[in-house]
Image (tube, coloured by chain):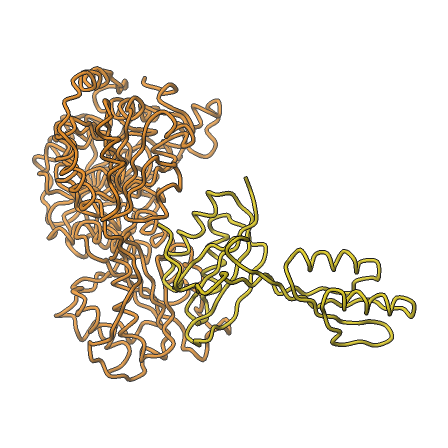
Amino acid sequence: MKEKFTVSLIVSNHFGVLNRVSGLYSKRNYNIDSLAVGVTENPEYSRITIVSTGDDYMKEQVVKQLEKLHDVKKVVLLDRENSIGVEHMLIKLRITEEAKPQISGLVVEYGGNILDFSNEFVTAEITGSSEKIDNFIEEARKFGILEVCRSGLIAMIHGTENIMSVNDIE
Amino acid sequence: MTGAQILVEELINQGVDTVFGYPGGQVLNIYDELYKNAHRIKHILTAHEQGAVHAADGYARVLDKPGVVIATSGPGATNLVTGIANAYLDSIPVIAITGNVSTELLGRDSFQEVDIVGITQPIVKHNYIVRDVADLERIIKEAFLIANTGRKGPVLIDLPKSVQVSEWEYKNEAKVSVKNLVPSGNCDISEAVEAIKRSKRPFIYCGGGVSAAGAGEEIMALSRKLSAPVGLSMMGISSIPHSFEYNLGMCGMHGRYASSAAQANADLIIAAGVRFSDRATGNTREYSKRCTVIHIDIDASEIGKNVSPKIGLCGDIKTVIKRLINEVPEQKNAQWLKDIEEFKAVETGFTNGSFNPKNIINLINSSFDEDTVVATDVGQHQMWVAQHYRFEKSRRLLTSGGLGTMGFGMGAAIGGCIANDRKPTVLFTSDGSFGMNLIEMATAVSNNLPLVVVVLNNGTLGMVRQWQTAFFEKRYSNTTLDRKTDFPLLAKAFGAKGYSAETLEQLRDIVENKLDFNGPSLIDCKIDKDERVLPFIPPGGSIKDIVLN
């Protein structure tokens, strides 16, 4: 059965590493739904979060193949139960006089902020689960979406455990 | 020291005494150091970079240590690509060193610039572009460690010209570490032991991993203890002696009938160092349904990749098999061994006269001692060698298993010959495969290598023709080679000896009386173009679909 799953990686922070990781996905015929990358508190390492869709076979293979890459220091499979995940979105909407209060209301309802606006458009930021972002987009559609930019999911393990303390998959 | 000096010093420090390669504009500094250090490290100049990388691969296969190849930037580097992929698919430790344009010219489409690190990324264990000479010593040390640790494989180091000329101190003390590449072999084997105890028809299936681990003795000890026949993937050939009483030879698409039949009828398969390639297993979904599979491999990602085993044991094969031997009781399995004898009695024959591939291979086989390195190219002749040559010593078959690279043979034979103290070395090839890299005859001549190149010449691309016969109603699209090449004359043009044989008597006379081993010789053997490789299990099929005659 195919389902979405999230892989969290700690990798060496030097050029070409992202290419190795994404290249492995395409080489092994795995899809990538979203990918987010940024440096960690230690500048030697970056953290990559990749969301894919696949079955148990693919899940297991992704982790085992990623573990073989020299620049990959840690691979952890995250699921809904053991992790929290959020996405960040910038969305630019067309604006009219009558829609203005509705749009402001929607942004407030979703806990977002308006970052930029004029008489023709408004750009808002929304943070939350991927479903929440999807829902916002659906509700905003009627106003006219000019563009959307999503960060891709970033995720972390629940509780006091951290990615480096999780045991490797046997 | 300059970067080029550090490279050569560190290669010598790694125990490298022979490198293969081809010079060019962006490796001039490296070649200058090789010139100055010719008394410490020998460079074998090939005629084409592909020949050099196959030679490094063949060298590594024989000696169980990394083979090194050097090429210039751009086309020099891209000419290595097939050979690197070949080493990757067969898990052979090869260190490829390429020159590149100076760091300030990188990314500008400079003359002979390619992104070889990007190009080779999917076909290496790891690769590097060195941007700072201060990292060079560590990177070379790391490259050797990665190539030769755990599941082995190729590593490429791209060395821009500016790094080759930059100065840095060589202290030979750079610290390197690679993460847990080698599992301990202390995995839980209790389930495997129970499965073995329950088994009445055990079968051991060995791949290249058994050769890589040097675990042939352990496999034979387990086989004897369990009365379990052993089948081999193509990469597993020569991992245990042909004469070992339970060795049934290669199984799979073109495997020996008894070996494939034993595999199909087993209730337990102990698979060691294999990756269940589609050529070896046929329908992988069906494979593990009818029996219990215990899969032992050093690479965790192989377990469950192609076949879902009931029991996966990740670890060094030698260690794991030793532990199994200690825990399992002796088994007799008399009925199973009787079945095996019946499988062995099934004959699959050559029909087209006495000068057929089997007899040619047998004649050559009995004329050379068991220490002889035998290389092949790819196609029908490769399968015939895999089926009929009796390998007694490990690391003596050099063949392109995973990638199936036509043109592998000449380079591999050169590397293998040099690795085996330049003893007489046999290359079985065909008119098609030989045509791809025959220019390396020049290299064999320059180096006085005693190669015996046996061309099984049928005027066609035989394996493809065989498939056209079976699946395309004999529409022989572009597989009939209307060439007029005179191979013996061609050999002579290179400065080698050239012979041709049309009967076994002629072949025997050439082998016994004419070969002098002062340099390479070629024997052109004309065989029937409709000789097929049999048995044949069609792709995705099973033992039920086997074609015997």
Residue B230 higher or lower than B166, as above or below: above
Q: Colour of chain B?
A: orange
In this rendering, would B126 be left or right of B413?
Answer: right
> Residue lying furthest right in this view?
A98
Hey, which quadrant is residue B371 in on the image? top left
Using the rendered image of the protein, determine whether residue B525 is visible from the camera's viewpoint: no
Name the residue nearer the viewer: B108 or B347.
B347
Q: Residue at x 80, y 76 (%)?
A: A117
Viewport quadrant of the C terminus of chain B = top left
Q: Residue at x 79, y 64 (%)?
A: A106
Tell me residue B254's x, y (percent): 32, 28
Q: Residue at x 23, y 48 (%)?
A: B185
In this rendering, would B360 be left or right of B465?
Answer: left
Tell me residue B330's x, y (percent): 13, 28
Residue B506 higher or lower than B341, as above or below: below
Name the residue nearer the viewer: B184 or B352.
B184
Tell me residue B27's x, y (percent): 32, 71
Name the residue nearer the viewer: B42 or A125.
A125
Viewport quadrant of the N terminus of chain B = bottom left
Hey, which quadrant is residue A13 in on the image? bottom left
Tell me residue A29's x, y (percent): 50, 47
Q: Residue at x 9, y 44 (%)?
A: B516
Residue A32 higher or lower than A145, as above or below: above
Chain letter, yellow: A
Using the rendered image of the protein, determine whether residue B80 is visible from the camera's viewpoint: yes
In this rendering, would B110 be left or right of B137?
Answer: right
Instruction: Count the labels in the image.
Output: 0
